[in-house]
């Protein structure tokens, strides 16, 4: 509805009629004789000579224009709509003016990727953004679904009230709805959001909801719902997931099997272990002669002879092998689903001993990759570090790029990186790659060991590929704990002064300053 | 007065987007060799690519801000000046504070510049006073005026013919005309020395292509032009005030000295809002003031061509003690600031109209004095943004509402700030829609958000 129509009174209506005549032109409509203007405009109209049709129309328009503008009375809107409740006790308090200023700068595009840090701190401290920034924040979350949960967590009742008025922001409005009800009535995307949100806070309630409609839900939806269980995954989910292995639809079975491999106590993992144990045999190394060949333990691999249908039920694809024999493929699939510590426990040896073992018949690759995935799926930092240290440098990059290390869950990956940095046995390049492959925010402990590594990298810069060091510094500036930020800034400045970095260090330094400013605003 | 500077206000000073973002990059103490401030000024030495750091100075005193930087940039203000201003609003502690003037005051290179500025201002005032006193040749002046009146009369006749042709053929036919169709009569009016009417005519093509309801708006606009035309032909029969308004609408300008010679109104003026719009090749800035005691609006206009900066000394939300001189005619509220003194953030609520009806009555009264008045600032007390079929309105406690302009881009921000509760809003009303310029909230602290339109 255009504003003027909302305003329609006799004045506007008359002006519309006059405009309709002007639209066609007096050549066609003749003079203004047919108009009977309302109110006191009638007297003025009566006084206009009608003989000259054009002049008469212009005269009447000249009189009607201020007459109509002066006659506006506004629109009657009646009852005002309901306002959201006032902030109650325990609700988030509005952030400081300086914090709001930082938010405004990010919303304008300056250091935009620090927004998550701001939102996370705000949530932890029970602080809400200023209401004037809510529309831009919601608009950003609309365009970037990955920040939606962080935004939704801080916008409070006013943000939800606002979002409920704009269809484009419905993702933020429905948090006020009862999850049970929304689960019953929502669209698939809305239901996925319900699951995602509940898994963070009440994982058991989420799975109860999922089970409550499981048999009635379309197979396509079920396959989309299952991956949401990755968050908050625990043995409480295991019976349900195990039952999903008998689902009629392959995508559902595959999703359930994948989730179960991340539960070392699951029956699926137990079955995998049973399949794996006969595959590996160990001949212990001789003691004492560490330097002599033959002192290492030797491992013999026996590949599975045939594909058992039960393997398919547990998520192994019989014919998916690429560039290797099917038996070796089955072996890899089995080993990579067995927690790596199974082997150190079975033989009573350290991961480092086993990672460095001699493997017969060129099966070293199979074993290393299988173990690496086994370590990843069981969050085993010790094993991962042992494998990285034992592997040739080039090998690590194969794991890193989309491989086992990159697939580790964030906390386990941080622990792995930290151990790797502490032990210093891997090459500088590998340690730097591990650090840049670990997303932030880094805990204090990892940040502390990152500084000496970056110092070491700065000294050996000429031997490194220059891009890797510059980007390592930038990555560190994004992720490092603020307790080590000053040291990092000092390191960057000093390094640049000694020999200019290929990257302009300004970005990293500005980032550190901005992050420090955010933290300052949220420190009580 | 530094507390009246905000990030938004500093960024609005930037001549273009790249200067703004370069300024943001320099808003870190790390980039500066020295940084200082006194009650009047800011300064700093910023390391650029050259050997010596650039010396950057900002005068925040009366009539400020003024900028001076030793860098070779032709942008004004340059990125260094903007960076320095941003440091003031973001991290004022980084600026070492000294007192104003004398021993222990600003460093020499800053103090010298400030002194030269004070001198220049004094000389300018002197020159203006001399100019006002300069003798005029009354005979030559009368001759000039008579010549222009003749030219305008001829221009009005041509306009009359053109308008008649327009309504005879119909507005529908005009809708598909090329730009030339509108520009030619406008150019003729400029030649006839009636630039005010030319400006109104140049707005017509935009009105004609303004979408649904355009014919009503076009007729309204044509009616306004014709009304001025008719008034101009009957100048002698009009009351003095309206005669002046008519001459102003035609484009007669009134010399500043003449305005400043009129009686002054001393009051505490609240800066209610500001908007900047492009008109032809000129940027026009409207700053609306409201007199606390006189309870009336005042409009301060400023014009700038090209990249020249507009006057930025009045901060929306501030209050100034000032002497104003209104332009004769007075229905258009245009005024000049003769002298301004203290500047502060306001402490009491804005003097808004209590209801929509009261505000519209004020507008109608102003129209009665000047029937072609284009717009008026309306401060509204305690209104609530409501959504009505996709459009936003501002409703008062009696349930009456003004529709918001569809060109106002921050309706959702206004709604967010209100949270469904009343707040104070000041904006321009043109008889059809309301365009907010400033939003005033009281919680958590009294604050004013400047939402006036800007063009870079």
Image (spheres, coloured by chain):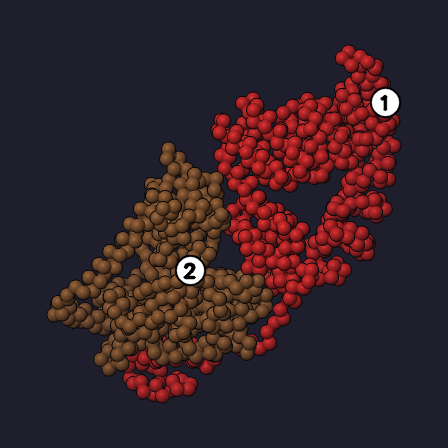
Chain colours: A red, B brown
Residue B317 versus residue A285 in the image, above or below: below
Q: Residues within 10 Å of mark 1 (few under 14, many from 20)?
A: few
Label 2 – label 1 distance at C-alpha: 81 Å
Depth check: B67 or B415 in front? B67
Q: Position of residue A373 (x, y in %)?
A: 75, 32
Q: Is residue A342 left or right of residue A426?
A: right
Vertical placement of A210 versus A230: above or below?
Answer: below
Q: Which residue is mark 1?
A: A281
Q: Which residue is mark 2?
A: B315
In this orientation, does residue B340 appear? Answer: yes
Q: Residue at x 55, y 59 (%)?
A: A132
When asked about the image quadrant of residue B270, the answer is bottom left
Q: Where does residue A473 sit, x and y in percent of width and height?
A: 57, 33
Parent chain of label 1? A
For the question of whether residue A30 can be seen, the reply is no
Picture coordinates of residue A52 (x, y %)?
A: 28, 81
Q: Secondary structure at mark 2?
A: loop
Q: Chain of mark 2?
A: B
Between A440 and A180, the residue placed more toward the observer is: A440
What residue is rendered at 65% in x and 58% in y? A92
């Amino acid at each position: 509805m255009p504003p003027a129509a909302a305003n329609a009174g006799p004045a506007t209506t008359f002006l519309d009629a006059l405009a309709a005549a002007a639209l066609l032109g007096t050549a066609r409509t003749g003079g203004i004789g047919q108009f009977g203007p309302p109110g006191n405009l009638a007297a003025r109209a009566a006084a206009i000579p009608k003989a000259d049709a054009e002049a008469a129309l212009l005269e009447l328009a000249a009189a009607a224009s201020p007459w109509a503008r002066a006659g506006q009375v506004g629109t009657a809107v009646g009852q005002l709509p309901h306002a959201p409740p006032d902030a109650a006790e325990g609700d988030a308090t509005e952030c400081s003016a300086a914090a709001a200023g930082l938010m405004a700068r990010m919303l304008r595009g300056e250091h935009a990727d620090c927004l998550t840090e701001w939102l996370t701190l705000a949530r932890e401290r029970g602080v809400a953004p200023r209401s004037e920034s809510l529309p831009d924040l919601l608009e950003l979350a609309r365009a970037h679904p990955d920040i939606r949960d962080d935004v939704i967590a801080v916008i409070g009742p006013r943000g939800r009230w606002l979002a409920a008025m704009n269809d484009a922001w419905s993702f933020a409005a429905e948090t006020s709805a009862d999850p049970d009800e929304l689960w019953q009535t929502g669209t698939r995307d809305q239901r996925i959001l319900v699951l995602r949100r509940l898994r963070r806070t009440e994982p058991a309630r989420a799975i109860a909801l999922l089970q409550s409609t499981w048999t009635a839900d379309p197979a396509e939806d079920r396959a989309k719902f299952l991956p949401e269980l990755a968050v908050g995954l625990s043995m409480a989910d295991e019976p349900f997931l195990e039952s999903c292995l008998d689902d009629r639809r392959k995508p559902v079975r595959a999703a359930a099997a994948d989730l179960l491999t991340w539960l070392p106590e699951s029956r699926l993992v137990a079955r995998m272990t049973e399949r794996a144990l006969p595959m590996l045999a160990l001949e212990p190394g001789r003691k004492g002669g560490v330097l002599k060949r033959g002192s290492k333990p030797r491992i013999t691999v026996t590949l599975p002879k045939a594909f058992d249908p039960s393997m398919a039920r547990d998520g192994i694809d019989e014919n998916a092998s690429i560039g290797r024999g099917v038996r070796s493929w089955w072996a890899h699939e089995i080993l990579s689903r067995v927690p790596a510590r199974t082997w150190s426990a079975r033989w009573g040896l350290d991961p480092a001993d086993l990672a460095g073992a001699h493997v017969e018949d060129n099966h070293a690759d199979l074993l290393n990759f299988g173990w690496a995935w086994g370590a990843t799926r069981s969050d085993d930092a010790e094993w991962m570090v042992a494998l990285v240290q034992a592997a040739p440098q080039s090998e690590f990059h194969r794991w890193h790029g989309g491989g086992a290390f990159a697939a580790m869950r964030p906390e386990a990956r941080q622990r792995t990186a930290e151990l790797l940095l502490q032990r210093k046995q891997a090459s500088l390049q590998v340690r730097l790659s591990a650090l840049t492959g670990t997303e932030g925010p880094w805990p204090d402990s990892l940040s502390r060991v990152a500084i000496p590594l970056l110092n070491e990298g700065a000294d050996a810069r000429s031997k490194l590929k220059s891009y890797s060091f510059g980007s390592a510094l930038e990555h560190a500036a994004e992720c490092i704990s603020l307790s080590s930020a000053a040291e990092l800034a000092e390191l960057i400045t000093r390094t640049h002064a000694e020999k200019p970095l290929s990257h302009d260090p300004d970005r990293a330094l500005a980032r550190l300053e901005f992050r420090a400013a955010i933290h300052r605003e949220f420190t009580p | 007065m530094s507390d009246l500077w905000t990030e938004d206000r500093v960024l609005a000073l930037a001549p273009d987007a790249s200067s703004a973002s370069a300024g943001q990059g320099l808003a870190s103490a790390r980039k500066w060799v020295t940084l200082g401030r006194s009650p009047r000024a800011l300064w700093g030495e910023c390391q650029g690519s050259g050997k010596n750091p650039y010396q950057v100075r900002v005068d925040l005193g009366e009539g400020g801000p003024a900028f001076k930087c030793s860098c070779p940039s032709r942008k004004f203000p340059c990125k260094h000046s903007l960076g320095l201003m941003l440091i003031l609003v973001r991290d004022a502690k980084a600026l070492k504070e000294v007192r104003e003037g004398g021993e222990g005051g600003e460093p020499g290179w800053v103090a010298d510049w400030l002194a030269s500025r004070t001198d220049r201002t004094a000389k300018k005032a002197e020159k203006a006073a001399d100019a006002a006193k300069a003798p005029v040749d009354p005979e030559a002046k009368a001759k000039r005026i008579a010549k222009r009146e003749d030219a305008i009369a001829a221009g009005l006749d041509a306009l009359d013919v053109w308008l008649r042709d327009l309504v005879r053929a119909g507005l529908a036919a005009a809708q598909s005309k090329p730009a030339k169709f509108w520009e030619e009569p406008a150019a003729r009016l400029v030649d006839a020395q009636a630039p005010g009417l030319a400006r109104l005519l140049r707005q017509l093509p935009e009105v004609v292509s303004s979408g649904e309801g355009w014919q009503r708006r076009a007729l309204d606009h044509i009616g306004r032009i014709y009304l001025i035309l008719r008034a101009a032909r009957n100048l002698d029969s009009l009351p003095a005030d309206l005669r002046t308004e008519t001459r102003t609408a035609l484009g007669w300008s009134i010399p500043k000295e003449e305005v400043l010679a009129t009686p002054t109104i001393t009051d505490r003026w609240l800066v209610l809002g500001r908007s900047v719009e492009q008109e032809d090749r000129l940027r026009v800035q409207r700053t609306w003031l409201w007199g606390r005691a006189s309870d009336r609006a005042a409009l301060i206009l400023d014009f700038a061509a090209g990249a020249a900066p507009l006057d930025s000394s009045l901060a929306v939300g501030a209050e100034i003690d000032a002497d104003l001189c209104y332009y004769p005619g007075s229905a258009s509220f245009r005024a000049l600031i003769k002298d301004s003194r203290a500047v502060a953030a306001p402490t009491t609520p804005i003097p808004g109209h209590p209801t929509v009806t009261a505000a519209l009555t004020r507008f109608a009264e102003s129209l009665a004095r000047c029937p072609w008045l284009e717009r008026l600032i309306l401060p509204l007390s305690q209104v609530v943004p409501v959504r009505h079929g996709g459009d936003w309105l501002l409703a008062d406690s009696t349930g009456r509402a003004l529709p918001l302009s569809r060109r106002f881009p921050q309706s959702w921000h206004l709604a967010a700030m209100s949270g469904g509760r009343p707040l104070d809003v000041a904006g321009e009303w043109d008889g059809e829609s309301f365009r907010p310029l400033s939003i005033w909230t009281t919680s958590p602290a009294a604050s004013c958000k400047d939402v006036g339109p800007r063009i870079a």
